[in-house]
Amino acid sequence: MKKNSLKFEIKVKNKIKVGMGQLLVEGGEPKRNLERAQLMIEEASKKNCDFILLPECLDLGWTHPSLKTEALTIPGLYSNKICEHAEKFNIYVCAGLTEKEDNKIYNSAILVDPNGKIILKYRKINILSKALEYYSIGTKLSVVNTPFGIFGVNICSDNYSDSLEIGHVLARMGAQIIFSPSSWTVDYNATEENDPYGEKWLGPFKTLASLYNLIIISTTSVGYLVGGPFEGRKMVGCSMAVNRKGIILKGSFNEFAGELTVVETEIPQRIEKGTQIGEMLKNKHYY
């Protein structure tokens, strides 16, 4: 474990070191998944990361049927464990979890500071049609100010090209970095040579990053989906960090085992605010 550092000193930091944690996620196996998450958080801390980004629905797995009976509240047992690890290893953690509230279930993400406090919670908005049986639609977007700058959070298909308004709103709220826990899946027979993702993700990421001079980082799980409407598909990693110039770092195509990839980058400075953003977009001929 790295030495306790002054994460909350007044001076704003201009660089950040982020661990992209491609975590093996097994559907319906929260204990094993959370144990692996703990090990990856510890590894990121030992590598002196300021922050680790973990995948979407890392507790129960994305669209695994067990979520209907096993999803927990936030705060709750699963989110509490993430908070404990963040505090123990003195690191920011963003993790995707399955959240139950009353009679609804959400595909959620939490951002936890090194004191173990949840400083942002987000519920996914752009739910895939086949997943609407499982998850309710989120209704809020927000960002949070930290010593590293302003962070925003969305989840996976929120970044589809036809739902990019979600990223635009986070940018207008001042986000300098958008973190996106994900669970990118492909058919079982897909290989790195015929990987269907590529531009599907890179295109929208580059659009946001280049327009607003921000960074978007997305970490995805690895493994095979069991149960649910996407059974048999595989999660293959390929996590990405993208700035206005393009890909900073990309994780490997890997459906078999998890890995931690570390990206260190300067934090981009956002100049325009309010209606200045509209003028900037017009000058860039975006509309």
Image (cartoon, rainbow, N blue to C red):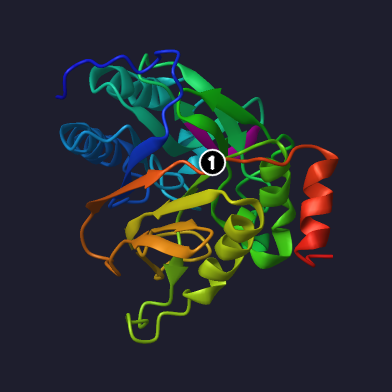
Relative to 46, residue 73 above or below: above
Residue 8 position, x and y percent, is: 40, 14
Image-quadrant location for residue 183: bottom left
- Measured as percent of width and height from the top left, residue 39 is found at 19, 36
Magenta part, dominant SS: strand
The amino acid marked with disc number 1 is: Lys
Magenta region includes residue 106: yes
Report x, y in % for residue 152: 58, 38
Q: Quadrant of the C terminus?
A: bottom right
Q: Is residue 45 magenta?
A: no
Q: Which residues are magenta?
A: 104-110
Tell me if I can see residue 134 in this picture.
Answer: yes
In terms of image quadrants, where is residue 79? top left
Q: Which residue in the protein does label 1 denote? A: 68
- The vertical placement of 37 against 81, above or below, is below
Q: Residue at coordinates 63% horizontally, 54% vertically from top-left?
A: 158
- Left or right of 258 on screen, residue 69: right
x then y, percent, for residue 138: 69, 39
